[in-house]
Amino acid sequence: MDTPNTIPLPGNQRILALDTLRFIAAIIVVFEHCNSVYSMVPKLPFFLAGFFNAKSAVAFFFVLSGYVLHLSLKNKTLTPRSYASFMVKRVFRLYPLFYVSLALGALVLLGLPLSSIESLVNSYFTYETIRQNHHDVFQWLMQTTMVMPPIENTFFNPPMWTLTAELRISILFPLLSALLAILHWRIALAVTLLIFCASPTLADFTIPTIGMIPLFALGIILARLVETKPAMKVPTAGLLVTGILLYCAATWLDRKSIGVLGQFYVAGLGSAMIMLATIKNSFLSTSLSRPWLVSLGQCSYGIYILHFPILLLTAYGFSFIKVPAFIFFGTVLVLTTLVSLLLYGLVEVPFINMGRKLAKKI
């Protein structure tokens, strides 16, 4: 979940538009998690249930990361120095705010009697976290690494599994980006299809996050399609509608028939279509590039990684007073957004700049 607008690339307005879409995806994640704790509706209508799905939003994040990271590596020769430079920027982009969320999570989980709040204990989203032994020093140390195999992804912040996947795949990403960049685009498309077919098997024999590599590869293909003439001939309206339907279909399709990874892949394909339509359609790209939307898009990483401890804190506060469910969701979203906007300026931007300076020295 990188920040596209921080990369000085041609067509910056279109990059900002994608940043806004990322903010919408972050809201979807917050909504589903709030709904699991404090049910806002007994059951969402068929279409909305497909749209407000956290797994599909995560697939969007991964495809967008592949797209943005490939652009950051474009026209750069893969060498040990360029690889080290890439990894330095990744570390300075993802770790600082994660450590803030780690500290906030520790304060909430160790300081509040959350196990006494029925809505948290009964929620599929929070149950595994609440029941953990949060005095386990070893596991807290593992959490600080974000990638070590003994890490328990539900220990303090369930959404962090996506950061674990992002960092592990980042180790391989420059190689994948370089490979798909030098191939003819039709061959690159065929290789990506092969990656889609092989990754589930590799994930079974290695680590589950390997199964997410195809979504990053799809982002690379998207970056290449943006620059090709065939993509220009595609009607953006039809592309957008098809993309939204595929994005939602990931929820509608039977998990037993296509598997969890299959759901991610279908949502990822739809996400790529939505992004391509947004980039190619001047009305969409301009509408989604308004300054206030861009500001919200910039802090979407914070919204994603900080909303869980803030959700727990809000649930504790509302355990003393009964409020409508939409008030709970609105409170979590507003608090998380305000905190994320503040930390974007205080934490994210300084460390991003620091990472760039170190990368240049390398």
Image (cartoon, rainbow, N blue to C red):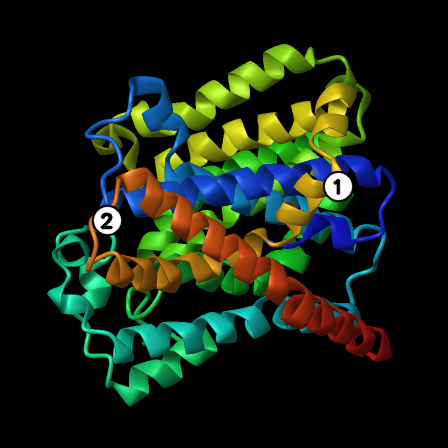
Kindly indicate the quadrant of the structure image that contains residue 85. bottom right
- Number of marks present in the image shown: 2
Q: Secondary structure at mark 1?
A: helix
Q: Residue at x 60, y 37 (%)?
A: 21
Up the image or down, 359 lies above or below 266; here it is below
Amino acid bearing label 1:
Pro
How many neighbours does mark 1 have within 10 angstroms: few (below 14), some (14-19), or many (20 or more)? few
Image quadrant for the C terminus? bottom right
Mark 2 belongs to which amino acid? Val
From the viewer's side, name the closer residue of 279 and 112: 112
Q: Quadrant of residue 72?
A: bottom right
User: Residue sitting at 61 percent across and 58 percent down?
Assistant: 341
Image coordinates of residue 239 in percent, x first then y, are 61, 16
Residues 32 and 276: in front is 32
- Residue 291 bears which disc, if any? 1
Q: Specify few, some or many for label 2: CA neighbours under 10 Å numbering under 14, 14-19, or 20 or more.
A: many
x then y, percent, for residue 87: 66, 70
The image shows residue 329, relative to residue 135, as above or below, that is above
For the question of whether residue 324 can be seen, the reply is yes
Give the mark nearer the N terminus: 1 vs 2.
2
